[in-house]
Amino acid sequence: MTAFPKLGVVALIGVLSSVVPAQADVVGQSQLGFVSRNALIVAGSPAAVWKQLVTPSSWWSSDHTFSGDAANLTLDPVAGGCFCEKLPADQASSATSAKSSQGVNLAARGGVEHMRVVYVDRAKALRMVGSLGPLQSEAVTATLTITPQSG
């Protein structure tokens, strides 16, 4: 079993189907913000848990996306990598302009950067910085650190 405590965001509570319920604790707070620690235990080898973690479309709720479909989420687990969401074109516009004259696929109408990877070491941590969902239009930034622990 591998434990993954998380700081800052509760987004991964439903990560895998075989998790032990998580408990969230506020471990620090000030007028400038707060830090929460959430821990859950995920059954599986570290490699299997890592593979699932970096595939957000398999655990993120479609209800918490701009596109309405978690299948549009990706996470590139490298420094500078993006936890991003593709915004597919509306059905009407994609039917008429699916390809340009150069054959380039124009099916996406845009995208969203949810967070940016700032540290990655598969054996130690995945850390991302950014603003999720409605916080993007505010002056709010969060840091999400996910660390494995033997447990």
Image (spheres, grey):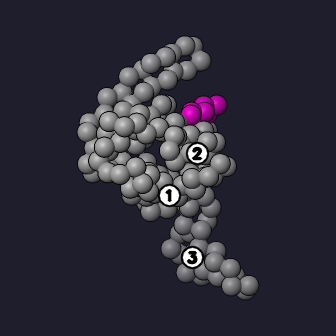
Alpha carbons under labels 3 and 2: distance apart? 36 Å
Which is more foreground, mark 1 or mark 2?
A: 2
Alpha carbons under labels 3 and 1: distance apart? 19 Å
Quadrant holding the C terminus: top left
The residue where tag 1 is placed is: 73
Of residues 15 and 137, the one nearer the viewer is 15
The residue sitting at the top extreme is: 30
The answer to whether one can see residue 133 in this image is no
First reached walking from the N terminus: tag 3 or tag 2: 3
First reached walking from the N terminus: tag 3 or tag 1: 1
Give the label on residue 146, or none: none
Kind of residue indicated by mark 2: Val
Q: Secondary structure at mark 2?
A: strand
First reached walking from the N terminus: tag 1 or tag 2: 1
The residue where tag 2 is placed is: 120
Question: Which residue is at 52% across, 58% downward?
Answer: 74
The residue where tag 3 is placed is: 94
- Residue 115, percent from left and from top: 58, 45
Q: Secondary structure at mark 3?
A: helix
- Type of secondary structure dominating the magenta stretch: loop
The answer to whether one can see residue 88 in this image is yes
Instruction: Count neighbours of disc 2 (C-alpha within 10 A) and say few if under 14, some if 14 to 19, many if 20 or more.
Output: some
In the image, the segment drawn in magenta is: 138-143
- Residue 106, percent from left and from top: 64, 74
Residue 26 lies in the magenta stretch: no
Q: Are marks 3 and 2 in contact (CB under 8 Å)?
A: no
Q: Is residue 12 above or below residue 87?
A: above
Kind of residue indicated by mark 3: Ser
Quadrant holding the N terminus: top left
